Image: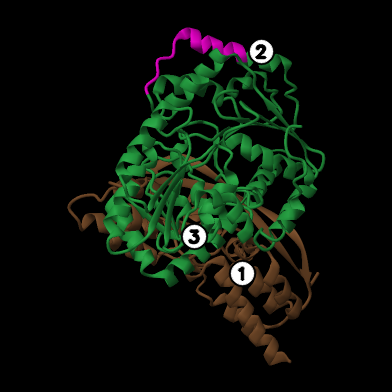
Amino acid sequence: MTANDNIKFASYRDVAPPGTMDLAYKLSEGLQGKTMLHVNSTRWGGGVAEMLHRIIPLLRDLGLDVRWDVIEGSSEFYQVTKAFHNALQGEQQDISPAMYEAYKETNKKNARKMDLNADLVVIHDPQPAALVEKKKKKVPWLWRCHIDASHPQRRVWNFLKDYVSRYDGAIFSLPDFAQKLDISQILMYPSIDPLSDKNRDLTPQEIEAAIGEFNIPRDKPIILQVSRFDRFKDPIGVIQAYQMIKAGNDCRLILAGGGAADDPEGRAVLDEVKSAAAQDKDIIILDLPPDAHLVINALQRIATIVLQKSLKEGFGLTVAEAMWKGKPVIGGFVGGITVQIAYGQTGYTVHSPEGCAYRIRYLLNNPELARRMGEQAREFTRRNFLITRHLCDYLALLKTYIG
Amino acid sequence: MNEFCFADCLEIRELTGKKADDEAKLLELIEEASLDSIYYHTHSYFLRHFYIVGPYPNDFANWVAIQVRDKVLGEKLSGVTPSPSHDLESVRNELAEIIDDHLASIRAIPSVIFGHSFYFMTSKIIEVPTEHRVNNLKEFREALAVVHASAIYNHLFEARMRVRRGKSDFALWLDEVLGLKELARQIENIDAYMYSLEGLRKKILSLCDRQLEHMS
């Protein structure tokens, strides 16, 4: 099994915006039986695999013949691609000629054993990018870059660019992530799945079952941030913002995330967070496992305001997740957060703990406005960041390249 | 064929690789941008905001007001509204003249400090005919209430500006096929740049309801 084929497109009728289902069915009419191949670097774990697990069954359900293959390599290969990943995101990395060779060799080996025949091929991220050497002239290949490559380490980008420029197009999640390329560069926002465990509606009993063990009192408004314990997510800034308003605006802060169990830096950040929270019983810190989807869903549902006060961010889909649950979101003015939050209408973007504190205070004291913003946030997400829109984007690409 | 066939549309957005970080660069790039790019930044805005109306109805005004924090130029650019008699080349010229005049009146060139660059984009529109084919006003109203919001964009903005039919498809059909000249005129006179697509849907539905009531 490569994807969850129990997911049916018709199940989305009640959550998709008006007309979207008909639009997708109509678009797919001319694409029946067309073949599409996705290749990425992992079947499980990470946002790309999660997205492919959800979107491929929907494309199949619409009559397309979609395959998903995964590049395989040694641990050395994954060390190289991890270094590529970090270098493309702007970190200085020392990559030796032998490492470049290992990358090329692994891609060659995979290309020999993979069936790369399809009407449209979509290669995700840098790991399998060199498969393009096997591209047939008449078959369109697209490179889908999910990472923030806006300030890459030049040497690594120049190496990859040789491959990327052989594609027919590159797809980026934000304009800032794109690069100077001679091929067409397409903008496609990521999406959330409203029917997944992380986002589906929950009954009060399900909420209780998911988070009952944490004994979170509901006697005062809850401010929530869900994110890894990572300095770029600024958990300390969140605590500072909370502390600035706590005296005049009684509320509770929940910082829920993961990344501390298997990451020394994550552990250090978690320790700093615990220390900053000091003895305040109204700050609840939850170190969650990576598969705590229902817990996160429930926490977002009991929150009054959701924060994503990142200092650096890719697309930051936790914002769309919270908005889908009808919550106003206060986010850092970085990356995709600025695209997801319509300032003053679905939430606010801020530049500092002071700005964050002011907006928390403002929303706590204007509950009717917060409620209205939450409603607008849900509708904004419905139209812009649900998987149904993402599916239509892929259908439009198929139509353009092979329709 | 007297029926009206609603058609949705989808937009594939493309990056041109050109970006501005200050108002002088914005002016330079507006002068050399393709008309498709001018169209994208003055119209496709609606396809990205089905539900919510932004502060100003074009990307240029929003960018200088929000990212550069030059509200004076934002206000001046907000008034640049294309119309059938005001083609995209005129829109480009007007945008350029306003920015040029503004830069001549200030000492320093305003630039982005904490905000995002302006990325020049363009788009391909794919028209997708729907099953909604209507023959009278009642059917038209029923279909309009349920079609994808992109159909409203397609028949109002694409028809007027990119396909250059002069008027919206709605007004043309209501006038020429159904003979409802007054309703066609009312729809044509809606200041469409002041609404989201969902707002436009509601507005046109209310005009249809009034007409249907009058006819009953």
Q: Quadrant of the C terminus of chain A?
A: top right
Tell whether A286 sits left or right of A114.
Answer: left
| Disc 2 to disc 1, C-alpha distance | 56 Å
| Disc 3 to disc 2, C-alpha distance | 48 Å
User: Could you tell me which chain the residue with mark 2 belongs to?
Assistant: A
Q: Residue extending furthest top?
A: A98
User: Which chain comes out brown in the rendered image?
Assistant: B
Q: Quadrant of the N terminus of chain A?
A: top right
Mark 2: few/some/many CA within 10 Å (<14, 14-19, 20+): some
> Can residue B174 be seen by looking at this rendering?
yes
Q: Secondary structure under badge 2?
A: helix
What segment carries the magenta color?
A92-106
Q: Amino acid at mark 2?
A: Lys
Mark 3: few/some/many CA within 10 Å (<14, 14-19, 20+): many
Q: Secondary structure under badge 1?
A: loop
Tint applied to chain A in the drawing:
green
Residue at 64% over, 22% down: A71
- Residue A111 point in image, percent of width and height: 68, 17
Q: Amino acid at mark 3?
A: Lys
Against A189, residue A15 (above or below) is below
- Mark nearest the camera among 3 and 1 is 3
Tell whether A347 sits left or right of B97.
Answer: right
Q: Which residue is mark 2?
A: A109
Q: Nearer the viewer, residue A133 or B77?
A: A133
Mark 2 touches mark 1? (CB < 8 Å): no
| Disc 3 to disc 1, C-alpha distance | 37 Å
- Residue A79 point in image, percent of width and height: 51, 17
Q: Which residue is mark 1?
A: B168
Q: Secondary structure under badge 3?
A: loop
- Mark nearest the camera among 2 and 1 is 2
